[in-house]
Amino acid sequence: MKKVIEASEAIAQGVMLCKPAVIPMYPITPQTHIVERLADYIFDGKLNSEVIHAESEHSAISAAIGASATGVRTFTATASQGLALMHEILFVASGMRLPIVMAIANRTLSAPINIWNDHQDSMSARDSGWIQLYVESSQEALDTIIMAYKIAEQRDVLLPAMVCLDGYNLSHVYEIVDIPEQNKVNKFLPRYKPLYKLDPAKPLTMGPVGFPDTFMEFRAMQHDAMGNAMKAIIKVNKEFRKTFGRGYGNGLIELYRMEDARYALMTMGTVSGTAKVVIDSFRKKGKKVGLIKLKCLRPFPSSEIIESCERLKGLAVIDRSISPGYGGPLYSEVHSTVAEKKIVVNSFIAGLGGRDVTQQHLAKALNMLNKKRSTEWLG
């Protein structure tokens, strides 16, 4: 069924199709519409789920951990300072190997106070052990929620997952969305069967003390699980395409006009749509340029990036976040990944605090690729 809906509602529709049993929620702009729509569905009898009205984001993610530990599917959402308040508990969720799915309506971190979009919030949490998937459109947001549950719940993965959508730039935008049929989703995403769960009839311990003689082994298992997630993301994306007729690259990256490209942009999120327009305009002028859209930040698809850069002379990495004292965090990872290749990789910081990233900005980044620079600010 196709409908014109807000991207936040598309996320909520995707969640409803996955039938989580527990939804802890705490409102924060620009995420609020997601949990509001879910509350509407529950009130209207469309979704059989328990809402927990938490007193903070810290409490919301803690409640999600408690619910997931009992063996049920759970969901929550947040943004910005809310994600920052969750920070210590993010590590608990991943360390306990709980497949929670959370939507992040990306918003910058204060100060100064700012409620608009960039990627600083989720980028600051990239080492917390959560799978991170970034989306460009409302359709991709809905679809990725469904895929995120299937990926996170794989027995050899069992890691929580963030689905990151740009605040306002996408969360409040209305687009045509094809909402899958429930019976198809049920076949694609069967009922969750936990490997372990809290059960009074079968007592067990979750989240014990990790002494120095065992802690590293736990972290090593998390790291290995991320490697398994890489394979699962590719597999699930293929299965989704087969079932629903659409997919997103190979699930990790999506290439646009890269077949013979010598120069390229790398983007995440909604700026990818603007980048495609710029690529098309350069192509009309006979310039061999392309786009690498990074969908998955964690696990980081190093081999896919290396392969996509094989024929490139230059790559412009667009960061919507900044690591003060170094530069763009995405740039730093990409640059180290392709360090052995003969390719110029330039860092461009753009769109911080909700500033528009225009076609002119991206064109400038492409035009500067024949010059070696460390960091350039666009806008």
Image (cartoon, helix red, strand yellow):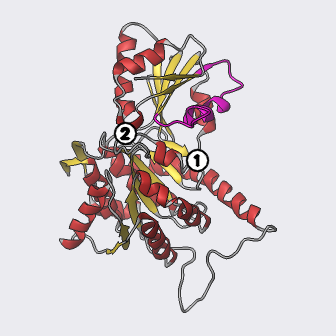
Using the rendered view, name the quadrant where residue 169 is placed.
top left
Residue 63's place in the image compared with 309, above or below, is below
Q: Do the residues labelled 2 and 1 touch (CB within 8 Å)?
A: no
Amino acid, disc 2:
Glu
Question: Which quarter of the image is occupied by the C terminus?
Answer: top left
What residue sits right under mark 2 in the picture? 136
In depth, the one of 292 and 258 nearer the eye is: 292
Amino acid, disc 1:
Pro
Give the SS element for disc 2: loop
Residue at (22, 42) in percent of width and height? 175
- Taking the magenta stretch, the answer to whether it contains residue 346 is no
Q: Where is residue 126 in the image (x, y as percent from the top left)?
A: 56, 49
Residue 357 lies left or right of residue 153; in this view the side is left
Q: What stretch is highlighted in magenta?
A: 320-345
- Dot 2 or dot 1, earlier in sequence: 2
In depth, the one of 208 and 157 nearer the eye is: 208
Q: What's the distance in space between the residues labelled 2 and 1, CA to CA?
A: 18 Å
- Farthest residue, direction top: 285
Q: Where is residue 44 in the image (x, y as percent from the top left)?
A: 17, 71
Q: Can residue 127 be seen in this view?
A: yes
- Taking the magenta stretch, the answer to whether it contains residue 331 is yes
Q: Residues within 10 Å of mark 1 (few under 14, many from 20)?
A: many
Give the SS element for disc 1: loop
Q: Is residue 258 visible?
A: no
Residue 43 lies left or right of residue 22; in this view the side is left
In depth, the one of 58 and 305 nearer the eye is: 58
What residue sits right under mark 1 in the picture? 299
In depth, the one of 236 and 46 nearer the eye is: 46
Q: Where is residue 164 in the image (x, y as percent from the top left)?
A: 42, 48
